[in-house]
Image (spheres, rainbow, N blue to C red):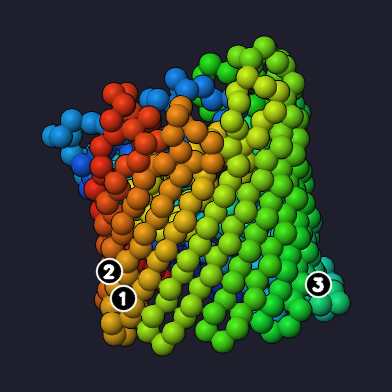
Amino acid sequence: MLQKSIILTLIISLTFSVNCFAIDISFHGDFNNRFSYSNQADINTSFSKDLGQYINVTDAQMATGKTDKSSDDKDYFGEIKYRLWMNAEDAENNLKGVLGFEFGGLKYGQESGADFGGDDNTFELRWAYVDWAVLANNKTHISMGLQPVKYHKWLWNDNAAGVKLSSSQAGVDYSFGVWLDDVANKGKGGATKDQNAVVLTAEGKYKFNDTSGASAFYFHRDGGEGKTALKGTAETYEDSENWFGLTYGTKWKNFSIDATAIYLTGTIDATTAFENGATELDRKAYLANLEGTCKLEKTTLKLGWLYASGDDDPNDNDVENFEDIDASSSPFGSVVLFSSYADDNYFMGTPYLRDRGLNVVYLHGAYKLNAKSTVGAGYIFANTATEVINETDLGHEFIARYQYNVSKNLSARIAAGYLVGGGAWDELSATGQGDNVIRTDASIRFKF
């Protein structure tokens, strides 16, 4: 009886507190069941990792991509990726707290994660932050904690822990941020400051009118003591990077154009020499993206081009390959080469192939059959910016898609891709002859 009284008292107290401070609490979920099949299972293992750094990669390190497999090596898997989060916010948008979790990468049919008994530990903290208004006009906010970082899709678009000041004054939206990352002892915590990366961000956005706008940003990363993604180069080094970026977007009737230019500079100081004998390297790299979209009543067409510079000489002291902070390759709309519906399983999770850069043209179309169904098709012509041994042509990828919205909260999607490998795809193999690849990705997704 006493326990029931205590519980009832706590419920009444909580309800009273919520009403007094006018705080609305809501719970949300994204329950994503994903499936994948391919005749070349190795493309599900990342060749270019989204958090990896690639410096002076040798030809021998490039020729281990395993793009050739025996004809009977076919693989499939099912995967569970569930997210749950809670929002606590006031009606005036002056205060918000978010706490989110993910149970993800739970595979069955391949590797581990969803064994019988379901005892594997795949818990991940996704969000834990507070956002509040610091001025009465509600135009200036501070957000603190582990939060979404959505600066640019090709540079940094994930989560990070830090503090961000955002405001809007005189028609300009701007922000400043300080972000911290443990680079030397992932999961353990760096014991000294040179084992932690610090990223400083500054961004401004301006709308010229209702149809056009531009932004400029500057990011600085003091990388601390890091390690390369591949063995054979200097194992430890300190990396200082600077990104200068400009974007522009405009719309006219049913058409829109978006352009991006990013320039990367910096220095790399190694405690042990790289393979070329140098201990200090200079970064000089860039990325350019141009994308046009046409939206009609039932049809959407998109044509895009992306160029990320590559390093053409691992023996000099210049590092000329573009590097992002933490971005996804999913904007390409690929199934085989880049991130797709099963976005933890990809050949390239970056807008570049290790240190050889990228030169990609992508074309996609979608047609809405009815209120519930959409079909689509796509084409990707992928090349590296500099040669993989002797070639730059990765291949031609052809894509087909279908989405059916079962209800407001439940959707089913499937995509199929077929890659006709080019000369660079062959060079990535162990035999000099890469395979053409078929892959399908599917998703049953419940969101609330």
Number of residues whose C-alpha sits closer than 10 Å to that of mark 1, classed few (under 14), some (14–19) or many (20 or more): some
Disc 3 designates what residue? Answer: 172
Q: Are the two marked residues, 2 and 1, in contact with CB atoms closer than 8 angstroms?
A: yes
- Residue farthest along the front direction in this orientation: 390
- Residue farthest along the left direction in this orientation: 72
Look at the picture and state if 294 lies above or below 112. Answer: below
Q: Are the two marked residues, 3 and 1, in contact with CB atoms closer than 8 angstroms?
A: no
Q: Position of residue 244 (x, y in %)?
A: 75, 50
If you read the primary sequence from the N terminus, does the residue marked by circle 2 or circle 1 appear first? 1
Q: Residue at x 75, y 42 (%)?
A: 242
Disc 1 designates what residue? Answer: 374
Q: Are the two marked residues, 3 and 2, in contact with CB atoms closer than 8 angstroms?
A: no
Hey, what amino acid is under mark 1?
Answer: Thr
Q: Residue at x 45, y 29 (%)?
A: 390
If you read the primary sequence from the N terminus, does the residue marked by circle 3 or circle 1 appear first? 3
Look at the picture and state if 276 lies above or below 25. Answer: above
Hey, what amino acid is under mark 3?
Answer: Val
Q: Position of residue 65 (x, y in %)?
A: 37, 30
If you read the primary sequence from the N terminus, does the residue marked by circle 3 or circle 2 appear first? 3
Element under label 3? strand
Element under label 2? strand
Quadrant assignment for the C terminus: bottom left
Pick the front one: 170 or 79: 170
Hey, what amino acid is under mark 2?
Answer: Tyr
Disc 2 designates what residue? Answer: 402
